[in-house]
Image: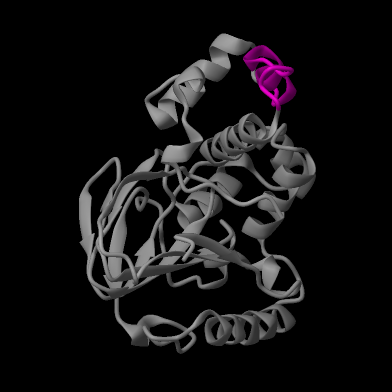
Amino acid sequence: MQLYSEHYVSPKTERFVNKIWCLDNSFGESLIENKLVLPNGCFNLAIVSGNVIEVHTSKNKYEMNEGIYFCSQMTNKVLVNIQPKTKVTIIQFHASTLSFFPKYDLSNFTDSIIKIDFGELPFEIKIESDIAELLNTINHYFEELSDLNSDKNLVEKICELIKIHNEEISVAEIGQLLKLSQRLIQIKFKTATGLTIKKYIQILKFRKSVDQMINADLEKMNLTEIALYNKYFDQSHFIKKFKDVTKITPKMFNPEMYFLSQKR
């Protein structure tokens, strides 16, 4: 059985949810250890069944037994160890999704994981739900949420502008386009995501660079070309930003050690 798999939500739900992915060691007899996950600008809701997954973030070590966990924005690589007879199903939310639930202030909440009660969720899920059931629940809830919120809120507009401009836009330019003060958009964005706009852009650029490294023929495309293509100043600048997240250089990067997105 494949350890890592991805599952995709309906087009309307994609406004809020990027995808659902699974780490399934439920039939395994051995520990899956020292696998790495990279930051991607998303929040994760993790459903753990069976035994335990151990997660090391830049701030702490977490032992996640059976239950549901909310994972904040990650700014550095995360190491995971998955015990035998353990399955982790992860709902990946876009950065702007939590801004539709204004009771949450995430200003000082990054690189962290908290266990939550089922009753805290706005939709009903079960530990034993299979992917088809989970997709049905998620699609139903978020399609309805989309219908109730036809207009984009401020954080969603900020994320949309960043995407439209391929991560090449400043906070000042975002403020000008939205006709709002830089201070206001910074406060609103950090409250909803835990990140500054600048840090969020850096994470998106980093992930695009990694995806390009994995999918490109590195014999034909060197690091300088990848750096310049993704609007880093030069190769040295790219290497520095890469090391900030992974603690290694791009040349030392081994995709086999990571859980990486599948190419759709």
Q: Is residue 233 visible?
A: no
Q: Quadrant of residue 168?
A: top right
Locate the C terminus and report the quarter of the image it occupies: bottom right
Task: Tell me if 159 is positioned left or right of 43 in this view.
Answer: right
Task: Tell me if 34 is positioned left or right of 156 in this view.
Answer: left
Viewer-proximal residue among 197 and 141: 141
Q: Is residue 13 visible?
A: yes
Query: Residue at image x 45%, y 86%?
Result: 129
Residue 261: percent from left, percent from top = 58, 50
The reply to whether the magenta stretch includes residue 51 is no
Query: In the rendered structure, which segment of residues is drawn in magenta?
Result: 217-231
Task: Tell me if 17 is positioned left or right of 241 in this view.
Answer: right
Q: In this figure, which colouring scheme has been used for the structure?
A: one colour
Viewer-proximal residue among 239 and 192: 239
Query: Residue at image x 53%, y 82%?
Result: 134
The reply to whether the magenta stretch includes residue 222 is yes
Residue 233: percent from left, percent from top = 65, 14
Residue 170 higher or lower than 222, as above or below: below
Task: Tell me if 191 is positioned left or right of 182 in this view.
Answer: left
Viewer-proximal residue among 207 and 168: 207
Query: Residue at image x 70%, y 42%?
Result: 175
Residue 199: percent from left, percent from top = 51, 37
Query: Residue at image x 60%, y 40%?
Result: 204
Q: Quadrant of residue 137?
A: bottom right
- Number of numbered discs present? 0
Residue 156 higher or lower than 169, as above or below: below
Residue 190 higher or lower than 148, as above or below: above
Residue 179 higher or lower than 135, as above or below: above
Residue 170: percent from left, percent from top = 67, 32
